[in-house]
Image: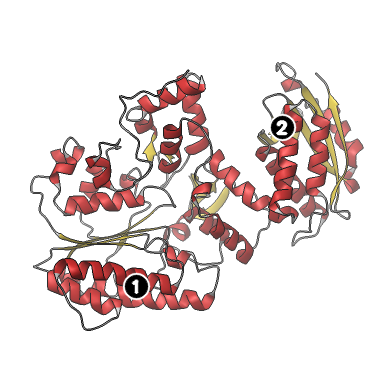
Amino acid sequence: MFRKPSDLKPLPVSTQEFSVIREEGKMYVDKTDLVWQMANGNEDVIFFSRPRRFGKTLLVSTFEAYFNGQKDLFEGLKIMELEKDWKKYEVLRFDLSGCISADSFLSKLNLLLTTYEERYSVNCASSFPGDRLHNLIEKISSGRNVVLLVDEYDYALQHTVFGDENEHERIKGLYRDFFAVFKTQSRYIRFIFLTGITKFTRLSIFSVLNNIKVIGFWPEYQAICGITEEEAHTTLRPYVMQLSEKMRMTEEQTYQAIKDRYDGYHFCEDGIDIYNPYSLINALNDMRIRNYWASSGGTKMLMDAVDKIGWDTKEFENIPVRKDFIEDSDANGHDLPLFLYQSGYLTIKGAVGRNYILGLPNTEVKTAMYEQILPRLVKKPQQTVDANINGIWQSLYDGNAEEAFDYLKALVADTPYSQDNSANAMEEKFRFIVKNAMHLAGCFVDEEKQTATGRIDLVCRYDTCILVIELKMTDNGGLEAATQQIADRAYLAPYLAQNKPIYAVALEFDAGQRGMTRYKVTKVK
């Protein structure tokens, strides 16, 4: 029986507080050289964007400990070679996560301000948060000795931008009142650091603070949040080896598995690979590879965005977006690829000329996306979709490939028309649904797989079999044309050497009937 080693430091799965991690001797991936560099650079008003669950809170709490002069927490870390003075500042930290309405935002601000007023024995005649912050900074200042740290500044804005417009506008009014103080009291402030998913440039924090630096795309700070490939192979290697032993996989197989599932984020042109830290740390702690990111929350925003902006079944791979647009654009409720990048569903996969090329970073995110989108594409309840996907999985597992396509046929029955009702648009929609369904059923899916004789619609590689799939609409030859094309172009030839069953699958779809009308599954090996 596998026994978990006791000589490894515990992983920080229950806290993102730097002081707690250090005081309790938990594992910490050392980013303190970058923290020092950012805190002592030429920019003293900074906005840093990263997706949800990417370590922003840990970064903010590290700044808090540094500016509080808590030298003992940094013993043994890289910053000790850089910092000599360890000066203590007056740090005001505002964590605005969890606020989804104007009332909850106002309540949290007042609670945080009350805490600081009591700590510093400061009274304020006004009840307005902006006035209270202005008074607080003035009373505790002694030169430029105040540090303002704001975590998830945009949480309330993000959670209302696709919903109630009146509530969103009310929240923006509260933001303007509060953040305007950052400018009016700037003579007392040594450092301002804000995190969030995106920036709302029409707020006073960005329009008034004209010296704010948006550094989320700066290469020198790309690794300050998240886990790099090097860190995964050094600091985290003992934990990876533990996972490898538990799962009875080789080291190479284990690294490939976690890379496929959690890696693949890039935050600048020619950027290094970054792992999602929340997912990777949880996987190493639980010693199992599963999806963590979506289950931690945030999927409602995706669905709200899809419902408001619309879903045109475009593939979310190889999407060109202008660099200046994605780097400088204001948050808005109109551009789905921009929102998907900001929220972590898409990442920078490359660059061509003036464009970034966006795509899905890894299988964890791909699965999260498809699980949310598929019920909307087929207009069926989540439990119906889940039942059919599980049926496909079970049938393939049992070696009954033909039955798997009974479940697929039921899944796509009565699929609603796209905005474009043409046969070509419906064919693309059906292909998209089939690809997503097979992925969720546990297949590794290659789309439009190029061979010497042609391009296969889908190749689905499952643990127990390989499915070579060709899809045709009724008015384009249907089942017979799909079957003939698989044979004439020898689509099966590249897979016959595999030591598992191979199936030729011809699918016929009809736009008028809005579903799959016929299919043919032929076992060829």
Give neighbour class at mark 1: few <14, some 14-19, many 20+ (Cα, 10 Å).
Answer: few
Q: Amino acid at mark 2?
A: Val
Question: Taking 39 as reference, is 333 left or right?
Answer: right
Q: Which residue is at 67% across, 25% downward? A: 463
Q: Amino acid at mark 1?
A: Ser
* Circle 2 SS class: strand
Q: Quadrant of residue 223?
A: top left
Q: Is residue 184 visible?
A: no
Reading the image, the residue beneath label 1 is: 207
Find residue 499 and report its horizontal and vertical position in percent: 70, 16
Find residue 206 and report its horizontal and vertical position in percent: 34, 69
Find residue 43 and report its horizontal and vertical position in percent: 23, 58
Q: Which residue is at 45% across, 63% downward? A: 329
Q: Which label number is shown at residue 459?
A: 2
Query: Is 66 located above or below residue 171 in the figure?
Result: above
Question: Considering only order in the chain, which callout, 1 or 2, is on the residue closer to the N terminus?
Answer: 1
Give neighbour class at mark 2: few <14, some 14-19, many 20+ (Cα, 10 Å).
Answer: many
Q: Quadrant of residue 445?
A: top right
Question: Taking 116 as reference, is 425 left or right?
Answer: right
Quarter of the figure that contains the C terminus: top right
Mark-to-mark CA distance, 2 and 1: 51 Å
